[in-house]
Image: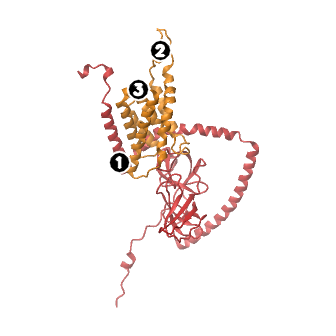
Chain colours: A orange, B red
Amino acid sequence: MPISTQLLRPVRFGFILLTFIVALLVNLAPWQAALAGLTPDFVALMIVYWALHQPRRIGVGWAFALGLLMDVADANYLGQHALAYSLIAYATLARQRQFALFPFWQQALVTLMLLLASQAVMLLVRLAIGDSFPGPGYFAGPLIAAVLWTPLSNLMLMHQRKPVSDEL
Amino acid sequence: MHANQPAFFKQGPKPLTRLMIFSALSFILLVSDAKLHLMDKLRQQLSVLVYPLQWLATTPVDAVLRAGDFMTRQTQLIAENRRLNDERLKASADAMRVKALEAEVAQLRALTASAPHAVGRQELVKILYNGRDPYSARLIVDKGSNAGVAGGQIVIDHRGVAGQVIRVHPLTSEVRLISDRNHLVPVMVERNQLRTIVYGMGRNQPLQVRYMPPNVDIREGDILSTSGIDGLYPAGLPVARVSKVERQNGSAFARIFCEPLAHFEQHNYLLAISGPAERAPYPESASAPAEAPRKTH
């Protein structure tokens, strides 16, 4: 019996960890300042992706822990990224059943809203602490992330779409 | 009934419950970090966890750059060597003069019995990366308390002051640049010794000298160097060059814009130096007139 190529293979936990580590690396890369905040927040993007595809494994707790790491690495106030990431992880999980059935371009729109919400939460936190608005360029990252969503999802699913041999 | 559920249904608390727990935790962390400054221990431990990632994020780029260095041509090396030798000769001539002056100053200071003007310990640090945070101008550097870097040290490059170490982890530390918003450096105009303060205005924004009257004697091209009266910055380090002076009729103050002299965007290494020695305690206010014996007839 042939198995459909669309039937996805299970994801190993090591793979999820690896993607998070790569996302952290990209966020910490030394050219971030030169790009003036235009790079999307890849850790947030990965949290949305995995909360969507593996809701039983990646949830609010992981988002919180990754947020804390980002806060320390970025010399922010502790809890800023943690709060924003926990919120978007919850928002993804709350509508996960619907969200997973959308075509890629609609998923990209939802991701855009989620990442904008995460930036807005961080902005509110910083305004409450007493910083000033860093300019509209601050919201450019999520737009680029939304454009990247479809190729990125396809790339990540490639790992799961490898055809399995028919023999049982 | 709960006990009979198959393992598949056991997922722990609901996402909403988790969100409540973790967002409450985040709020607690935010308040205790931003307002109460209680979280330094936790931050230090987490920073050790993050260090391998920081190392990994910067090392490959370095390796490529270093490979590029390896391919440098012999002629370039010889030319550079010659240039460096010339510079060293010039610098050593300057250094000799400085030594003579230092001896003279030490003698004069001994005469007036004031505090010595010694340079503290120095530490060469390497920039790991700029923070992603658009709200602040900070750098993460690769030495921490294990290497002897201490909070409050001044960070300079070969042109001028770059910033100040504000937080020290075991393996890394955070440097607040002088362009960080509301970072203040007490400075002196080198041309006429006018003392003032230069304000950081945010990442990639020019520095400003604020609250000076419109007729203040500051011109374009003036060099501002640290005045040393704050007890944090050693005196005489160049900080910024005045790039534009606006004197408008309508405003009570001149708008003076400056460019930082240090180019922290361009190279990898900075020097962390300790501040000046502890200064004499401030005299108690109005103690002298009160204790002075009154003349009575």
Question: Dot 1: few (<14), some (14–19), or many (≥20) neighbours within 10 Å?
Answer: some
Q: In the picture, residue B119 is in which quadrant? A: bottom right
Amino acid bearing label 2 = Ser
What's the chain of the residue with tag 2? Answer: A
Alpha carbon separation for disc pair 2 and 3: 19 Å
Q: Marks 2 and 1, Cα distance to the nearest angstrom?
A: 52 Å
Q: Residue furthest right?
A: B75
Residue B1 position in % (x across, y down): 23, 21
Query: Which corner quadrant of the image does residue A62 belong to?
Result: top left
Asked if A129 appears above or below A86 in the picture, the reply is: below
Q: Which residue is mark 1?
A: B31
**Residue A63 position in % (x across, y down):** 40, 35
The residue at which mark 3 appears reads as A100
Chain letter of disc 1 in the image: B
Q: Chain of mark 3?
A: A
What amino acid type should be assigned to the residue bearing mark 3? Ala
Residue A120's place in the image compared with B183, above or below, is above
Residue B263 in view here: yes
N-terminal of the two: label 2 or label 3? Answer: 2
Q: Quadrant of residue A59?
A: top left
Element type at mark 3: loop
Note whether B111 is above or below B27 in the view shown.
below
**Quadrant of the image containing the C terminus of chain B:** bottom left
The residue carrying mark 2 is A4
Label 2 residue SS:
loop
Residue at the image position 46 percent from the left and 30 percent from the top: A105
Query: What residue is shown at x 49% (from left), y 24% (from top)?
Result: A157
Q: Is residue A74 left or right of residue B82?
A: left
- Confirm or deny contact between disc 2 and disc 1 (CB under 8 A): no
Q: Amino acid at mark 1?
A: Val
Q: How far from the left and from the top, in percent, is residue A68? A: 41, 40
Which residue occupies the foreground of this view, B157 or A63?
A63
